Amino acid sequence: MIKLQDVSRIFSVGGQEVRAMDYVSLTIKSGEYLSIMGPSGSGKSTLLNIIGLLDTPNSGSYILEGLDVTILEDQQLAEIRRSKIGFIFQFFHLIPRLTAIQNIELPLVLAGVGKKQRSLVSSRLIDEFGLSNRKNHRPDELSGGQRQRVAIARAVINQPAVLLADEPTGNLDRSSGAEIIDLMEELNKRGQTLVVVTHDPEIGERAGRCIHVVDGRVISDTTKS
């Protein structure tokens, strides 16, 4: 489903060239559960941002579901990002003035889906994620774990091809973090392609496949037997 070939990403920092990605090649199959691990500054988030079309490589190719996205214009990339990629972030990125259910519905609002259909889909997700009694609460009235559940529901409401999670438990206590990982793994068991960036070996090793990134290069790629 995803194929990166010799992808490089170079930044200029203080007049010096920094290779955040250094000729990375990577293939991800539909339905896979992949973790990306490595020390701080290793290029994990840069790799995730390129996969998620939040950043573009300086060289190399990126094929997403048969389409070379490296040759597309910004507007085309935004449309693919909206329809095919779901994002989960460490700090939730919920809109403070919106309720839980309004935050979940937001991608459908932006896609022009009618109110009746939005309500039907979001209500199902609210119930499925155990948030039915919190649906009219704003983010500051929710626990960290509840906020991340809202964020996950928002991320999957468009049925994306791939779900990308950047340190999804980094702002949660251990118990809430374990619940969030369990929830994402359940989505993967139903066929959702899942890519998780984490610095926590315990979380990373739960994935079916784990790659380690150091200095912008993939130094290991291990699949569980």
Image (cartoon, helix red, strand yellow):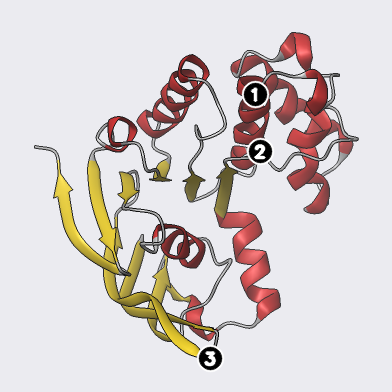
Most foreground residue, 95 or 63: 95
Q: Amino acid at mark 2?
A: Phe
**Eye-nearest disc, 3 or 2:** 3
Q: Earlier in the sequence, mark 3 or mark 2?
A: 3
Q: Amino acid at mark 1?
A: Gly
Q: Earlier in the sequence, mark 1 or mark 3?
A: 3
Q: Is residue 209 above or below residue 4?
A: above
Most foreground residue, 124 or 149: 149
**Eye-nearest disc, 1 or 3:** 3
Q: Residue at x 64, y 40 (%)?
A: 91
Most foreground residue, 146 or 126: 146
* Label at residue 144: 1
Q: Is residue 23 above or below residue 187?
A: below
Q: Earlier in the sequence, mark 2 or mark 1?
A: 2
* Label at residue 15: 3
Please tell me how many numbered marks the rendered image carries: 3
Are the two marked residues, 3 and 2, in contact with CB atoms closer than 8 angstroms?
no
33 left or right of 122?
A: left
Image quadrant assignment for residue 119? top right
Q: Is residue 11 above or below residue 219?
A: below
Most foreground residue, 81 or 113: 81
Q: Residue reaching furthest bottom? A: 15
Image quadrant assignment for residue 143? top right
Query: Dot 3: few (<14), some (14–19), or many (≥20) neighbours within 10 Å?
Result: few
36 left or right of 78?
A: left
* Label at residue 92: 2
Give SS at disc 1: helix
